[in-house]
Image (tube, rainbow, N blue to C red):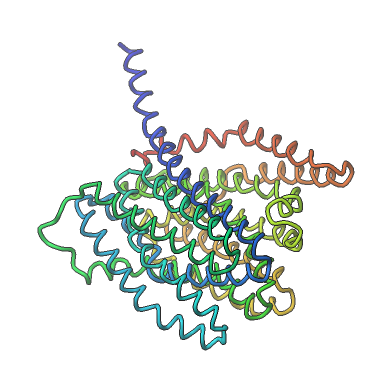
Amino acid sequence: MVLESEGQTEKAASAPRNLLFSRAFQVGSGQVIRRCTRFLFFFFAARKLGPTTFGVYALLLAIVSTLAIISGEGFSDYLARELSKAPELGRELYVRVTQLRLLYVALLFVPTIVLLHTLKYPPEILVDASLLFVILFPIAPFGAAQGVLRAAGRFGLLTWLETAQGSVLLITGVSLFAKAPDLRSVVWAEVASAFAGGIAAVLMVRGLRLPRLKSSVPWRQVIRETSVFNIYPVITNIYDRIDVVLLSALAGSLAVGIYAAPYRILNGIQILPFALMSALLPAISGTTSNEDDQQLCSRMTGFFYSLALFPVLVVTLLARPLVLLLLGNSFAESTPVLRILIWATIPMFVNFGLNTFLLARSHEKKFLRTTVVCAVVNIAANLILIPRFSYFAAAAVTILTEAVLLVQNVIIIRSLRGFFPVPDRFWQTSGIFLILLGAGLWGNIYTASLWPAPAVFLLFAGYFYITGYVHSILTWTRLGAFTG
């Protein structure tokens, strides 16, 4: 009887862990599909268009992405958090949030085109920008559906959403490029992909058969509660994408193309932390704060700090062959840019965890201050440095901005929760990493081959496993925060 009881207890304790990783895997699968399809399309377009025309595409995409953020990209997190507390509001909040975002999109169209015209962009770019702007309409139900599906625990459907959108992007893009490899083909592929995702999102939410409320959720309440989720992503996006706009204005489209390609690699590397944090947010939000928050943050930051060192190690040693393989010789100047940008993953990964922790503990209003500070630092530094150092300045400022955000997050957690979120095994991990990185660089110089990179990667992976970081993330659920 005792053995049977112990076995049942162990089985019950492992259930939350299995659920956590199942959800993280499902979210991660969706993000892998999304980012891989966009990754392939992005670099396929780069090869076909060349650095200068590709720079124009990157600029337009940055502008439209900024508008997507302004119209309410953060509403997905709002829905995931609120519906995890009150599932009965699912249908009504989905409709309200979608309608609100569509309203914002409609209000943004004319000012955006007027602004581009004022900045003296040529007429053909204004036409392409107007066509690309259309994708914001299907993005509204798509983004809201992601929040609903996360709250409902239907993470597998997120994978199908991304599959629908990504497949249409690749198929349409390749087909159009075969006929006319120009900027307009890229724009139409983006439009087709966005509408495929929007339609699929609406059908999936309808399939959940969410309950109808007898009374509607007041508009004033929705606008007030979503305002913070609308504002802080906007400011974050300003410092995340303004470098592309400033590069275009101060250094030209060629500089944008050289910088945007490696930045896409940096963006793609964020799949894993995004997947884990997306799966954890509803679980953390559904619980109250507990005494183990300090231990949780220490393990979380230690895990993500170590995880970030893997891409730093690989890219530092293999940047040139990676760039030539993905982009070709015309993008050879992107190699040093990638080597600089990759170091931003360290503060970036840690910030993923700390931002999710603060959001789950309802401290999202603090994001307004942190993002404003980051935006000011980013814009000021780019304006000062880009005219002199071009895309190298934009890459360095990206690292600076993420570091500024990390310092602010640490200070906020110390002030609000009473502890410093110091990464577990920080000095030990850093020392091992630096030794392996030095060995890899020495091997590259004296052997003139690629074998040192995989060798040091495997050694660091062995350290990562032996020192217990994999086990550490498994034990998060034992702290009482993740009950599924």
Asked whether, in this view, residue 456 is left or right of residue 223, the answer is right
The answer, for residue 381, to whether it is visible in the render is no
For the N terminus, the quadrant is top left
In this rendering, the answer to whether 258 lies above or below 119 is above
Asked whether, in this view, residue 77 is left or right of residue 427, the answer is left
Q: Nearer the viewer, residue 136 or 6?
A: 136
Q: Nearer the viewer, residue 326 or 171?
A: 171
The answer, for residue 473, to whether it is visible in the render is yes
Residue at point 38%, 70% (across, down): 71
Count of numbered circles in the view: 0
Residue at point 71%, 41% (across, down): 432
Q: Nearer the viewer, residue 264 or 326?
A: 326
Locate residue 440, reporting x and y percent: 79, 43
Asked whether, in this view, residue 268 is left or right of residue 220, the answer is right
Examine the image and state in which quarter residue 391 appears: bottom right
Locate residue 404, reporting x and y percent: 58, 65
Examine the image and state in which quarter residue 381 appears: bottom right
In this rendering, the answer to whether 372 lies above or below 322 is below
As drawn, the residue found furthest toward the right would be 446
Locate residue 306, reporting x and y percent: 61, 44
Residue at point 45%, 70% (across, down): 234
Residue at point 63%, 76% (across, down): 248
As drawn, the residue found furthest toward the top would be 1
For the C terminus, the quadrant is top left
In this rendering, the answer to whether 276 lies above or below 224 is above
Locate residue 342, reporting x and y percent: 66, 56
As drawn, the residue found furthest toward the left would be 214
